[in-house]
Image: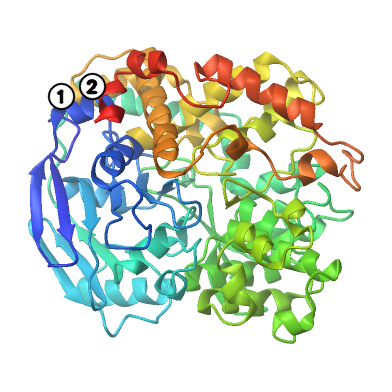
Amino acid sequence: MNGYGGTILRINLSDGTIKKEPTPAELAAKFLGGRGFGIYFLYTEVPKGADPLSPENKLIISSGPLSGTLVPGAGKMDFTCKSPLTGGYASASVGGMLTAELKYAGYDSIILEGASERPVYLFVDDDDVRLRDADDLWGKGSITVEAELKRRLGEEFQIATIGPGGENLVKYACITHDFGRQAGRGGVGAVMGSKKLKAIAVHGTKSIPIADIDDFYARAKEMYKACKASELWEAWQRYGTSGVNAWANEVGAFPVRNFQSGALDDYSGLSGETMRQRIVVTDKACFGCPSPCGKYSHSKKYNVYVEGPEYETAALLGGNVGLLDIEDVAYANWLCDELGLDSISTGNAIGFAMECFEKGIITAEDADGLKLRWGDPEVVFALIRKIAAREGIGAVLAEGVKRASQIWGKGSEDFAIQVKGMEMSGYESRNAPAMLLSYMTCDVGAHHNRSWAITYDLEVGRDKISPDKAAKVIELQHIRPLFDCLGACRLQWVELHLDLGHYAPILKAITGIDRSWEDLLKISERVWNLTRMYWVREVEGFGREWDYPPPRTYREPVVSGPTKGKLVAWEDVQRLLDMYYEQRGWDANGIPTEEKLKELGLLELVRS
Ligand code: SF4
């Protein structure tokens, strides 16, 4: 199969069996790869009602047909499983080098099933695949273990690890790779921890078969040239996502104090320029990327090296908890990386706890003696450590803000900033209805990366509630996740405006299969609808209510900044959903119709 490793690796951690199965050509034709493979295996192999942290759940790791090739940014990998945070679909993507290495070892996916009794790590060196003892690595931090495995196995091995957060089944534990890149959301690290799998180490030396090598080289070169020629390239390389910090603050989208406001009075301590001047040591790229957005930083104050803080971390562990010094945020970032926690959910959980403290819903007694005041770095660091260890108040926050608000009650549900049980990432959107709709309808919960529609709100009018906003969200929900099926980064398109017209022809040069861009979008729509059907199958009573935003969105106006006084009224929340469902071909409860499933070739699959 041109463009593919050709083999699926199936590891049963309960009995230690290792199987190699050919990658089915029909699967590649229908779901492409990456998250497409992930949802297919999740839907068809994990039994209905499985406990996400039981051996019945599977962790599916997949590259895509572009992964490991010379397509710019072809270094994305997907981790799919049933989410312990939401009880629904989880898919988290990570950059770095692992996806290319997996393809070079000859594999498209690794399916991890069952659970080991003792800590192990997965060793893959081309055809040599083994589970190895990891007793001495258990309990150690993600970054520490990555360095240790590279020392033992060789620099050429690419490693993904969990930290103590994953071992302790924190519901939003992440998987770390390449010294600070994360498969962050939905608790994929907790699922890996439940299987007692500490790490994955992969090395490969094979090549990827390419259908038309000359055409491929010519097209890849053209794409690189276009990236480098972009007038946006220099700023993107200089700041990476930290360039968004100032912009988000200026437009009132930067979450402050648990999303009470969308702007800091003075954000200078967190700006991309401050970060560049004070802590950035060098730029860092994923495999084959011409536009390195990774910033490798050193905090002199805490003497730690960390990748970042990128925008989301600066937002959630900065403004959202009141930390205004980039070095404090960098250390909080490092703690999350080492302990294996998603910095978005962690910052959201801490902000939630601080607001509960501010409102008197919890006291220092509930917080192990800590006074949870905004902007106290030592309190933030202590809470991160407690969450990873599930110690004291950390055991409550480790469950995520939805469950924490159910435990603490007293109206705290209104400002638990989550959708479907997943904490919202870093865009306050009470004056950005398309962005809000993106969060409401995202397939994993309140995550930004499926549809970053806030720029569309700014472009066409922030107060406007109109069908074109729903259409834009749907369009983005097909384009952006398509990159996660292909196994490539979307940021060359988003940030450098690389023409989307490059992708179908280069995919043809790689695989030999001729598909139009519209064909590819149809595959993405198929994947989107199957993820929706997974929620329908797994969550009793799933429907419209699961797409509702946090009550703060429609009950409490923004308290300060350029969007002061704004909210999205309850009737407008309903209108947005009506427009979205109608355009998607779903019923009024948000369930894909039989007709839609038929159109996408999913009817048999969901009925079986
Ligand atoms: Fe990785 Fe950033 Fe390059 Fe994308 S743009 S491939 S995330 S370094």
The residue that label 2 is drawn on is 509
The amino acid type of the residue labelled 1 equals Ala
Residue toward you, 585 or 311:
585
Say which residue appears at 22% left-offset and 59% top-offset: 202
Residue toward you, 349 or 142:
349
The residue that label 1 is drawn on is 211
Q: Is residue 321 left or right of residue 228?
A: right
Kindly tell me whether residue 402 is visible in this rendering. yes
Asked whether the beta carbons under mark 1 and mark 2 sit within 8 Å of each other, the answer is yes
Say which residue appears at 9% left-offset and 44% top-offset: 21
Secondary element at image label 1: loop
Choose the circle earlier in sequence order: 1 or 2. 1
Decide: is 73 above or below 136.
Answer: above
Q: Quadrant of residue 608?
A: top left
Q: Quadrant of residue 467?
A: top right
Q: CA distance from mark 1 to mark 2?
A: 6 Å
Decide if ligand 1 comes within 8 Å of the CB at mark 1: no
The amino acid type of the residue labelled 2 equals Ala
Q: Is residue 584 left or right of residue 250?
A: left
Number of marks in picture: 2
Q: In the rendering, at what x and y percent does residue 301 appear?
A: 68, 79
What is the image's colouring?
rainbow
